[in-house]
Image (tube, helix red, strand yellow):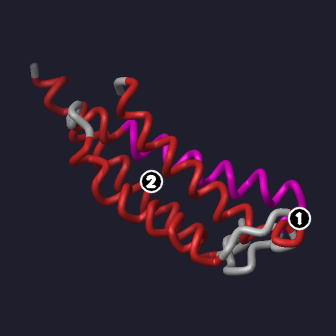
Amino acid sequence: MKFKSWIPFSLIALSATIVIAYDFFPKLNEIVTIPRPVVMLLLLLIVSLGFFVTKLRKDHSAKSNFVWHVAFMSYLFGLILIFTLLGGISQVGLSLSSPALWLVIAISVVELVREYKKLTIPTAAS
């Protein structure tokens, strides 16, 4: 991915980090107060950039999409893992012991494997 394509990823990652940090550590609100409209704006930013990020990027190839998905999924899983190890407890159920989280991860991995196979099969046939 080119440098400009990392800008939307960085905005999404920063927004997701703030929102997930506030979920795992609600006492942060006592230290640094983020108004509810700002949190809602961050959520809206995550969702809207997530939907439109492929439209914004000029290197819209299958390989860059695959790298994008792997990087973001790994980042979110790592974030949940680190916040759990730091002693945070999710208020909405993002726990490593949650079957729902593992189901979402399994579905994501299956989709990533399908994407990877689509990438490698045309290359092997050439």
Furthest residue toward top: 126
The reply to whether the magenta stretch includes residue 71 is yes
The reply to whether the magenta stretch includes residue 114 is no
- Nearest the eye: 1 or 31: 31
Across and down, in percent, residue 65 comes to 30, 41
Up/down of 84 relative to 7, above or below: below
- Report the side of 102 relative to 26 (left or right): left
- Report the side of 37 relative to 65 (left or right): right
State the residue at coordinates (43%, 34%).
6
State the residue at coordinates (78%, 69%).
33
Helix, strand or loop under label 2? helix
Q: Amino acid at mark 1?
A: Ile
- Compare marks 2 and 1 and give the one earlier in the sequence: 1
How many angstroms separate mark 2 from mark 1 (CA)? 37 Å
State the residue at coordinates (40%, 46%).
69
Magenta: main secondary structure equals: helix
Q: Quadrant of the C terminus?
A: top left
User: Magenta residues?
Assistant: 67-88
- Which residue in the structure is indicated by mark 2? 109
Q: Nearer the viewer, mark 2 or mark 1?
A: 1
Q: Amino acid at mark 2?
A: Val
- Report the side of 95 relative to 44 (left or right): right
- Report the side of 50 relative to 27 (left or right): left
- Which residue in the structure is indicated by mark 1? 31
Up/down of 113 relative to 62, above or below: below
